[in-house]
Image (tube, coloured by chain):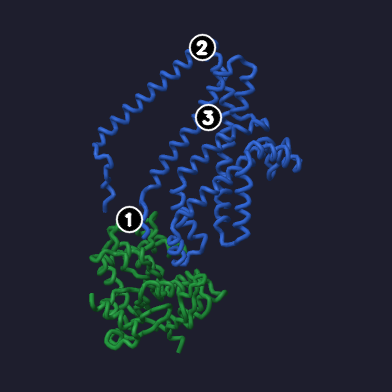
Amino acid sequence: MTPDLKLEVTGQPREYRALKLALRVLLVSALMAITLAIIYWVLSQNYPFRWRPALQHLDAFNKGLVLTLQVSAVAMILGAALGLLVALARLSPLFFLRDMGTLYVHSLRNIPFLVFILFMYFGVAPAFQSGAAVDLFGWHIDGRLFWGILALSLFEASFISEIFRAGIQSIHPTQMEAARSLGMNYFRAMRYVVLPQAFRVVIPPLTGELIALVKESALLMVISLPELTLTARQQGSQLPFQFEFYTILAAYYLAITLPLAGLSYLLERKFKIGGREEVS
Amino acid sequence: MSQHNMIEVKDLHKWFARLHVLRGVSLSIQEGEVVVIAGASGSGKSTLLRCINGLEKIQSGQITVDNISIHASKTNLNKVRQRIGIVFQSYNLFPHMTVLRNITIGPMKVKGMMSTRANERAMNLLKRIGIAEKAQAYPDQLSGGQRQRVAILRALAMEPKVMLFDEPTSALDPEMISEVLDLMRELAKEKMTMIVVSHEMGFAREVADRIAFMADGQIVEIAPPQEFFSHPKDERTRSFIEKVLAV
């Protein structure tokens, strides 16, 4: 029973290190603020900043934000679910499942997402004669939304599957053997023994990929899906404050992605309980 | 004759690629019998155990446990494995589950036992080895000896007819070995059919009904402890015993 015994690497007291960290954060922030202030001042010699009128347009940003959040959330769920299936296929004892998984991952991962969106929306969608609207089980969905989410999910699934595969492979095969020895079949052993341990391992890279997904959703503007980026661009193009608009746009994306990174940290700590058994 | 035998291995051959690890192993073990298998590393002891519960495929020969052919294609391995408990050298407990959950997961998810009943049975098992207070601890909070005993309980919770032990004390500090051997001794007294791969010759002499010595993928000698130690027939057994007794 030694869970409370933590070795201090530096040998310095906790309070001292906290103080040092606070000072460091303060110093870096101050340097950043000064640098930005100088840049801002230089720019303002040629460009008249108009933040007040620019901020009048936040309603439009908020509308775009809602769509970006919706698209990202659905694509995360679909992408993660498909990614897990592809990962399991790539680890399957059946060679054709393995090969199909490999083909999927390598074909999607190695083309630009922009090309894939164009291919899906202007290539595949017309072939299904479903550019404007899609009927999904009697559910009427905007065609841009449907194909946009589909493209994003399929594309991200190829990256997410590699993360899951690495996570599953990092769990020692003896865990699978121990589970099978109790009489569990392959899927139960995966479900109760391997995947819960693998999940803990993949939290950081998985969150990184989900953040990438949110950022990639900006490219959906090319199929005129009015998400955050397209909204900002359309509004801004008629108005004389581009700098302000793109600054606000960047801030909106940070407002989505930074909490995601924080969530990763929290999840990682939450699932740390129990620790791991050393493998000899 | 064969219906009395709990475990029957007939002319078993096993290759790892071109490496011929088991070269015609035959072994019959009766219900309630305890057989200790000794032998140098690489002699095929562990592989034999892993073949018996179907963790390894075999290339020729036959293995039956409780009259079920393990490697027949129609055999449902998941069902047979419920009757065969196995304990590994490195415990292989599930690190993300509490001790209690480690013991109940098999009965609950494989046999469909209700959690209240599974928990009650697991607590009784833990009380038996005197670590009921560790039920909510995680494996990495236990000592090696406690971990291995929990691993034994995890296998016992499935109510197996046969227990296989693959060097259960080899990863343990010396002072922890006896607590694991004590539990195994109790199981032997309760007439559990056991195969124990081990170098613990004191334990073998006291508990085993027969001791087998393996070398080069074969069982070169199998005899009751008295005879095994006093009148070894094979030269390799003799030199093994000399080395062991010299310690």
Other residues around mark 2 within 10 Å, as few (<14) / some (14–19) / many (≥20): few
Tell which subunit mark 2 falls on.
A
Chain letter for the blue part: A
Q: CA distance from mark 3 to mark 1?
A: 41 Å
Tell which subunit mark 1 falls on.
B
- Tell me the quadrant of the picture where the N terminus of chain B can be found: bottom left
Residue A267 location (% of width, % of height): 42, 43
Q: Which residue is mark 2?
A: A44
Q: In the displayed structure, does residue A157 sit left or right of residue B244?
A: right
Q: In the displayed structure, does residue A55 sit left or right of residue B40?
A: right
Element under disc 1: helix
Q: Which residue is mark 3?
A: A253
Element under disc 2: helix
| Amino acid type of the residue that numbered disc 3 sits on in the rendered structure | Tyr
Tell me what residue is drawn at x 64 percent, y 29 percent.
Answer: A226
Circles 2 and 3: CB atoms closer than 8 Å? no
Chain letter for the green part: B
Q: Which residue is mark 1?
A: B140
Q: In the displayed structure, does residue A127 sit left or right of residue A26?
A: right
Element under disc 3: helix
Q: CA distance from mark 1 to mark 2?
A: 61 Å
Question: Foreground mark, 1 or 2?
Answer: 2
